[in-house]
Image (cartoon, grey):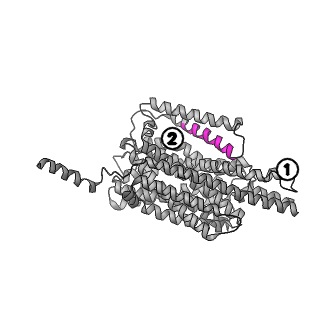
Amino acid sequence: MSGTTAAAVRPRRLQTGAGTSRWVVLVVLCVSLLLVAVDATVLHVAVPAVTEDLRPGAVELLWIVDTYPLVCAALLILFGTLGDRVGRRRILLLGYGLFGLASALAAFAPNAATLVLARALLGAGGAMIMPATLSLLRHVFPDRRERALAIGVWSAVAAVGAAIGPLIGGLLLAHFWWGSVFLVNIPLMLVVLPAGRLLLPESTGDQDGPWDVAGAVLAALGLFGAVLGVKRLGAGEGAWSALTLGPLLAGVALLVVFARRQRRQAHPLVDVAMFARPAFSTAVGCIVLAMLALVGLELIAAQYLQLVLGLSPLRTGLRLLPLTVAAMVAGLAGARVLRRFGPRRMVCAGFCVTALAVLLLTGMGGHDDKALLLTGFVLLGLGLETTLFGAYESMLNEAPPAQSGTAAAVGETSYQLGAGVGIALLGTVMNAAYAPALARVPGVPAAASEAASHSLGEAYDVAGRLGGPAGHALRRAARDSFVHGLHVTLLVSACLLMLGAVMALRLPRTMHCEGDPVALPAPREAERARVSA
């Protein structure tokens, strides 16, 4: 979504050519991104409270958690290209407004269906905000060295936002009801909306040719159908069920039609030829795998800390705080590390460190091991943020300059899609490993065992109603089964991360800086030497 700034910029807006104003704009953009990233995970620690109050079914609970990132991922291309047409700043400000209204609806949702709807509207608001942040960032920082530092800050904020979501949720749940995790967005939006209106420059992209509305709808429906099938699997539905296989096949078919349509369009929404570039497609795959591990593991870790170790939501958030600090450090150091070691080694090392952290966390059991959790979460934050930074920077710079806006939309879609699919995929593995052990618990009725197999929280509720030796046996079996499922899920995640490390070997060995003024004297000197000879 790159482009030129509108020719007439009102005097009240900062001129982006000045060094100070560029960093002020970066602050506003990062605050915008922080709100979107926090909302992707702030609900995780509130899941037990939501379950107790609204009593959602297993599928409804998955939708409550997954709807936000999946709607956001499905609509990024639509709103990203619309911003190119009508102005990215305008779409960004509209996204702020929708985000605030949807937050109020979610906070006071009387039932699970209303909460799912509110989360969908939050996803739509996030889809308006995210493409605009990276598009404006690319415009404000034309120099690649400065842009690399800005992307490092931007990606660190994204990872930090996802990580501090549980901490913010824990702080609020310690004093208020679960809806307070959404109300926190409203005062922040009241600050960021006027700040964005005053400080952000307007910019548009190439407006030649018609906007492919049909293509945008195809992409959105295709993503929804494909992920719905995965979500059904995550809820424990049969792989051959019509309600699982149907949406999955329909979604894949729509995405294939979308890709073919884009090949025929004179002005496509997404130039699919970019994916023929090994470095570009590899970077996109790395983003998906990294986010899959981060958000999926965080959800499971939050449930482990609360339901197995019995920590409060606040203490759960504090336990996840080292991940936040480590990610921030890795993001701020990313530009220097990338220039020294290059994309290939940086991303590959990031995946390996993350896999090491995941394997270390398989030591989690029924008892609290603070040193193990601290070490694992620190390594997880360092590895994931190193991976995300290297992949994002490589992807944006691998795309042709004229298609940088499309690259930004693809990257952000991959980010959100990885987060949503991560919850669904790792949830599928978790359920598959958790449920079988509860099929037959001595002394527990079959109906109670069936209800307990849906989730650990529901198993505790059933055990409490049963009481006596049967309730105690069910509670212990459910906890042990959850820990077993956690170990299986971590091993699967480690395999996916090592796959990412192998994928990263296709990235460029070094960071090419064609526009870097430091790299220009050497060719000039060589040319002068040839002329003299």
Q: Nearer the viewer, residue 516 or 44?
A: 516
Q: Which residues are magenta?
A: 219-238
Q: Amino acid at mark 2?
A: Leu
Q: Is residue 26 left or right of residue 434?
A: left
| Residue at the image position 72 percent from the left and 62 percent from the top | 307
Determine if the magenta segment contains residue 473.
no
Asked if labels 2 and 1 touch by Cβ distance under 8 angstroms, the answer is no
Residue 398 circle label: none
* Label 2 sits on residue: 78
Q: Residues within 10 Å of mark 1 (few under 14, many from 20)?
A: few
Inspect this view and state whether residue 467 appears: no
Determine if the magenta segment contains residue 234.
yes
Give the x, y percent position of residue 216.
52, 37
**Which residue is farthest top?**
264
State how far apart marks 1 and 2 are (Cα): 46 Å
Q: Amino acid at mark 1?
A: Ala
Give the x, y percent position of residue 378.
54, 65
* Label 1 sits on residue: 447
**Disc 2 on helix, strand or loop?**
helix
Instruction: State the image quarter where residue 360 is shown.
Output: bottom right
Q: Earlier in the sequence, mark 1 or mark 2?
A: 2
